[in-house]
Amino acid sequence: MHGDLVVLAVLVGAGAFLLLADRTQIPYPILLTVGGTALAFLPGVDEFVLDPDIILVAFLPPLLYGAAFFTSIQDLRANYKPIGLLAVGLVTATTITVAVVAHAVVGLPWGAAFVLGAVVSPTDPVAAAEIAVRSHAPRRLVTIVEGESLINDSTGLIAYKFAIAAVLSGTFSLSSALGDFVLSAGAGVALGLAIGWVIAELRKRLDDAPTETAISLLTPYMAYLPAEALGISAVLAAVSAGLYLGWRSPELVTPSTRIQIVGFWEILTFGLNAVLFVLIGLQLRTVIDGLDQYSAGELAGYAAVVAATVIATRMAFLFPFNFLSRLLVKKLPRRTGEPPPDFRLTALLGWSGMRGAVSLAVALAIPLHTDAGDPFPGRDLIIFLAYAVILVTVVGQGLTLGKLIDLAGVYDDEETVAEQEARARIAASQAAIDRLGELENEEWVRDASAQRMRQSYEFRIRRFESRLDEDDDGEIEEGSQAYQRLRRKVLEAERAEIIRQRNRGDITDEIMRRIERDIDLEDARLEI
């Protein structure tokens, strides 16, 4: 097959998987995993060897920063106990158990076995959260999964670097590694916060969407690369910068810029994940060809054993701590609003340990040779087994998580969520009315404009108050829905008219798009 046709097939396939994810409600990480596997066996795809040096630098910073930026710090604080336990304790346990199994069963040398353990130890911030949300998981489960996957990347990648260094140099010191871990983590967080503060001060002085979007893209690299050069935790630097700027973002950007940046990061995250799975698909054939000393049965058996070890370690780690928490729950004070341990939630959390792009990136980044010039021991087998774990956890666990949630009967109280949103909107509208009262005496404020605006906010308050009233007959909401329907019909007429004017040559495409954008924003505003 001609190379251009292969590229076309990859692009069409990625678009088809995204469309299929939307139509079937299957989370896109599942489809990308399946598609990447299928790509390895696509006729005409030549053997492909990827330079490992570019993987971590090119893909990890934006993936980690983007996940951190959209993570709620409040939710992290509210669930810091389980998140800390999983992000440090479980990653360490998984690294060790997988290394032991890989050495005893698969036959990997100890150094390479620990590399494999570190590669598959962290869950993925995109795959785990996307699958959990699409499976209608409870909010607390999603929060813990997101927080765990965000923080455990740091632990897993630090362990990965220590294991890689041990294999490359042939030496390792546990006491030195622990000291380096603490120093590297603390310095990485400090650098990330410092970079975040500098970027925040810069963005406060900007009001240009393209420039701010470009700075948003450069920020993870500005945190990651200096940390990498200094030998400290580049992962924690990128994550810390993302958390800091995500918290301060409401005061840094204008509404129109925020809309563009959010859309940009959604596309970028999907694109980076898609490219990574395409790259592993292209390289998987080369990896498999390098494992010709193993039979298909042996490879399948090794993959099953390693994947089962990853899943079993997670389950075996979670349930004892859940049981211990139940014993101590009456003796230790719980924070207000903190729910008691729930075995059903623990089981779902144990089944939500999906691996993804992060494990894939670090597996592909394993060096080709040691410092002595010898081939890195077991590199192809490590990549194959890592991809097998991703395949089992993303596809196997991802497709069944929703059914397990239904079986467990663990859901969010949708009424409570709706009530919280309604009260927040009422408070925001009342704040607007109060501010309007302060501004009414200004010379530039017209009475008619102030009155019209006041009536709009008063209606909004009545509308959301009706959602909190159990005895409400729904008349206000029905009237609002009828107004939205009428407004959309009118907006469609506006949109059609500017298209006609463009087609007649009365206005340019630039003018049409400017007006069309305003119409689109009004249309989107009607969703509230």
Image (tube, grey):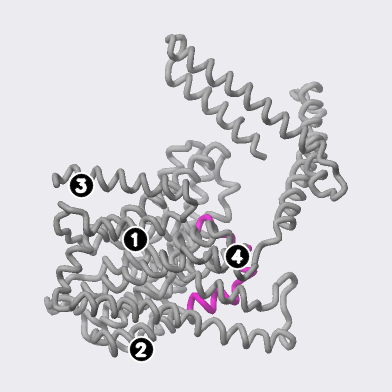
Binning the other alpha carbons within 10 Å of mark 4 as few (below 14), some (14 to 19) or many (20 upward) gives: few
Can you see residue 227? yes
Q: What residue type is labelled 3?
A: Val
Q: Please report whichever mark, 4 or 2, sits nearer to the chain's N-terminal start.
A: 2
- Residue drawn at point x = 35 percent, y = 86 percent: 176
Q: In this view, does 141 lie to the left or right of 354?
A: right
Residue at which label 4 appears: 406
Mark 4–mark 1 contact, CB under 8 Å?
no
Between the residue at mark 2 and the residue at mark 3, the CA separation in whole angstroms equals 47 Å
Between the residue at mark 1 and the residue at mark 3, the CA separation in whole angstroms equals 33 Å
- Residue drawn at point x = 43 percent, y = 65 percent: 124
Residue at which label 1 appears: 225
Name the foreground residue: 440 vs 260.
Answer: 260
Q: Please report whichever mark, 2 or 3, sits nearer to the chain's N-terminal start.
A: 3
Tag nearer the camera, 3 or 4:
4
Q: Residue 174 carries which label?
A: 2
